[in-house]
Amino acid sequence: MHLDISAVKEPGVYTGYIRKKVFFLGACTAVLALLAFISVGVGSVMIPFSDVVRTLVFHSSGNTEMIIWN
């Protein structure tokens, strides 16, 4: 299916449609990343969210890093 450019009477409407799609996909990506970080901290050992972020982003040492990476 190809876009029939003659069918697009108002390019601003189409641009708005694409902008909404990009925003939606960006929001879904952000929510997915947040849920991934939260899911790492939930398990047999409850790890605070700040410790999970610190370990994944800055590779801090200690028990938290050993639990997360193993």
Image: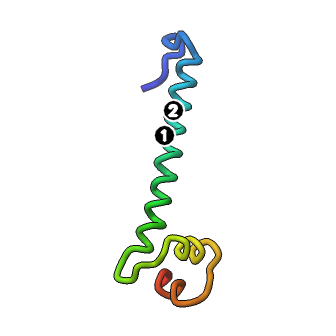
Residue at the (55%, 25%) spot, across then down = 16
Assign a secondary structure to mark 2: helix
Please tell me how crowded label 1 is: few (under 14), some (14-19), or many (20+) other residues with Cα within 10 Å: few
Task: Indicate which disc residue 37 carries.
Answer: none
Placement of 19 over or under 4, stated as above or below: below
- Dividing the image into 4 quarters, which one contains the N terminus? top left
Q: Nearer the viewer, residue 47 or 66?
A: 47
Residue that numbered label 1 is attached to: 24
Residue at the (49%, 43%) spot, across then down = 25
Q: Nearer the viewer, residue 14 or 66?
A: 66
What colour scheme was applied to this rendering of the protein? rainbow
Locate residue 49, reporting x and y percent: 50, 70
User: Label 2 sits on what residue type?
Assistant: Lys
Placement of 14 over or under 53, stated as above or below: above
Residue at the (58%, 16%) spot, across then down = 11
Locate residue 14, reporting x and y percent: 53, 21
Placement of 45 over or under 25, stated as above or below: below
Outermost residue on the left side: it is 44
In space, the residues marked 2 and 1 are separated at their CA atoms by 6 Å
Outermost residue on the right side: it is 58
Residue that numbered label 2 is attached to: 20
User: Label 1 sits on what residue type?
Assistant: Phe
Residue at the (49%, 17%) spot, across then down = 4
Placement of 29 over or under 60, stated as above or below: above
Looking at the image, do the residues carrying marks 2 and 1 touch, with CB atoms under 8 Å apart?
A: yes
Assign a secondary structure to mark 1: helix
Q: Nearer the viewer, residue 65 or 8?
A: 65
Position of residue 38 in the picture relative to residue 51 (left or right): left
